[in-house]
Amino acid sequence: MSDELARRLVERALLEGDFVLRSGRRSSFYLDKYRFETEPELLRTLGRRIADAVAVHEPDAERLAGPALGAVALAASASMASDLPFIIVRGETKEYGTAKRIEGAFESGELVCLVEDVVTSGGALGEAVSALRDEGLVVRNAVCVVDREEGGSDALARLGVRLWALFRAQELLELHKTAAKWHG
């Protein structure tokens, strides 16, 4: 893979070690979303790529949705690149202020495309799909930066949602191994 964005993701965010993932699984590598979401140029480029993927895979989308906290920066960046407004899906309904689980303006019946950082089991996205549908929103597609290919795509398919990934974890790991050979 010769993609410059993939190289930058690997360089910036791929960590090796012993990690426990949100799903509870252990992994010898971790893609630290905060390392790529807090780098302005990388975030801007990812936002453009996500916007391009939404235009191809969900061209009738009326709004983007990003689960809090991890995907909010990506959804905002993709929103600016696509001129589609976005909403934020909280992990749970807050008990203060407006007491909402979905933040931002939307209308029931709108077609929403989910934006996510890294997908492993699909659990977090599945929860977001349910929350959005509970509010009357239509969700058919999701775009993520990285699919770890550990069941997330299948879990979402069971909910009637298709997952589109900018990158697959295996591709990034291969790129990392190749780079290590050249530098090692």
Image (spheres, rainbow, N blue to C red):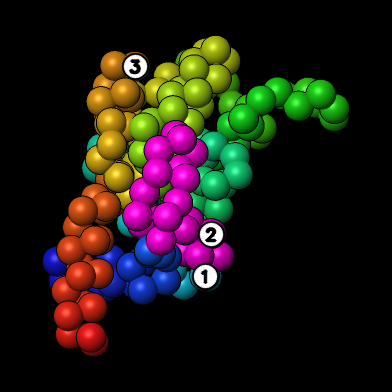
Mark 3 = which residue?
159
Marks 2 and 1, Cα distance to the nearest angstrom? 8 Å
Residue 184 occupies which quadrant of the picture? bottom left
Q: Provide the secondary structure element on which disc 1 rests.
A: loop
Q: Nearer the viewer, residue 175 or 64?
A: 175
Amino acid type at mark 1: Glu
Tally the marks.
Answer: 3
Mark 1 Cα shell of 10 Å, populated few (<14), some (14-19), many (≥20): few
| Residue 136 in view (yes/no) | yes
Image depth: mark 3 or mark 2 in front: 2
Mark 3 Cα shell of 10 Å, populated few (<14), some (14-19), many (≥20): few
Mark 2 = which residue?
34
Magenta range is 17-38
Amino acid type at mark 3: Leu
Q: Nearer the viewer, residue 118 or 62?
A: 118
Q: Residue at x 85, y 29 (%)?
A: 97
From the top left corner, tell me how far across and down residue 32 is, in percent.
Answer: 47, 58
From the top left corner, tell me how far across and down residue 110 is, in percent.
Answer: 47, 22
